[in-house]
Amino acid sequence: MSAWLGREAVAVVNPDGRGPFVLVCDHASNWVPLSLNGLGLPSGELERHIAWDPGALELAGLLSGLLDAPLVHATVSRLVLDVNRDPTHHGSVVTTSEDTVIPGNRELSVEERSRRVQSIYEPYHQALARMIERCAPRNAALRVVSIHSFTPVYRQERRPWHIGVLSGDDRRLAQPLLELLRASGDLHVGDNQPYAPTAGVYHTLDRHASPRKLRSVLLEVRADLIGDDKSRNEWALRLSRALEAIH
C-alpha cells in the first residue's frame, strides 16, 4: 500500500467464487486521498457522476453473490486516476470533467502523475490479472463482465437507454445478451450506447480479456434505475439470469 494513498487501490470481493465469471467495477469509488484536499473541489462535486459510477459497486456486489463470481473493484475516484484508461490516454487524469474544472489535476508534475500510476493503476490491473489467471484453469469458458452506471442526462441531453451493452470486435457475449435483454420487451437497450469502445472505455477489458481470447462485455446501467436496494436487487436478478443463460 502506498503511504500517501492511505489504502489499497483495489479490493476483491468473493475471491474464491467458483462461477464462470470474473466481475470488474472500475469506477466503484468516489474516494480521494486526504493529501489531495478533494482535488480542490467542493465536497458535493465528489458525489456527482464525474467522480464515480453511483450504484455500480452495489450492483456488482449483488451479481457477485448471485453468480458466485469474484469481483475486482477500484477504491479510488476516477478523478484521481481512471483505471479504465491507458496511462498515456488524455482521460487518464482529467483537468476538466464534463464542464467542471478539476483544480487538483491542473499543472500536474511528471512525478505526481507517475506516482498515481504506480500507486493506483498498476496494483489494480495486477490484481485483476492475478484473479483471471487463478480462475481461468478451472473455467474453460471464463467470461469477464465490467459493471458501470451512466448519468441519465449529459449536458442537457436526456439518455433514453435503460442499459447499454458495450463490446469490441468480439461480440460472442454481447450479441446474445443484447437479444435476451431486448426480448423482455420492457427495456430500451443500447448497443455500444451511450459509449463505444472507440471512446477508450473498453481499456480494462481490452487489456485483460482480449489477449486471452476470453468473452467479455461492459454493462452500463442508467444510474437513476439503480438508486436503491430494491431496484439494484431487481437488476441483479435480471442480469444474472441473462448471463447464466448464455453458454
Image (cartoon, grey):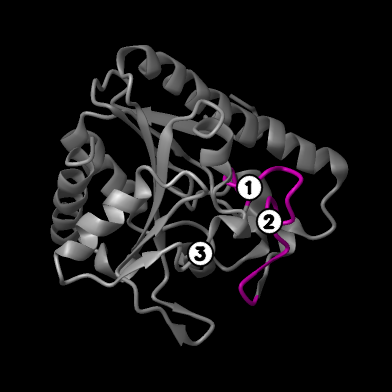
- With respect to residue 21, does 162 lie above or below? below
- With respect to residue 61, does 3 lie above or below? above
Residue in the image at 39% along x and 28% along y: 12
Please check the rendered image and state whether residue 200 is part of the magenta-colored stretch, yes or no. no
Image depth: mark 3 or mark 2 in front: 3
Rounded to the nearest whole Å, what is the CA distance between mark 3 and mark 1?
Answer: 14 Å
Rounded to the nearest whole Å, what is the CA distance between mark 3 and mark 2?
Answer: 14 Å
Residues marked 1 and 2 touching at CB (< 8 Å): yes
Please tell me in which quadrant of the rendered image residue 4 appears.
Answer: top right
Name the residue type under label 1.
Answer: Arg
Q: Quarter of the image containing the N terminus?
A: top right
Overall secondary structure of the magenta section: loop
Which residue is labeled 3 in the image? Answer: 195
Residue in the image at 82% along x and 52% along y: 108
Question: Which mark identifies residue 119?
Answer: none
Are there few (<14), some (14-19), or many (20+) residues within 10 Å of tag 2? many
Name the residue type under label 3.
Answer: Tyr
Please check the rendered image and state whether residue 97 is part of the magenta-colored stretch, yes or no. yes
Q: Residue furthest bottom?
A: 156
Which residue is labeled 1 in the image? Answer: 85
Please tell me in which quadrant of the rendered image residue 178 appears.
Answer: bottom left
Range drawn in magenta: 80-99
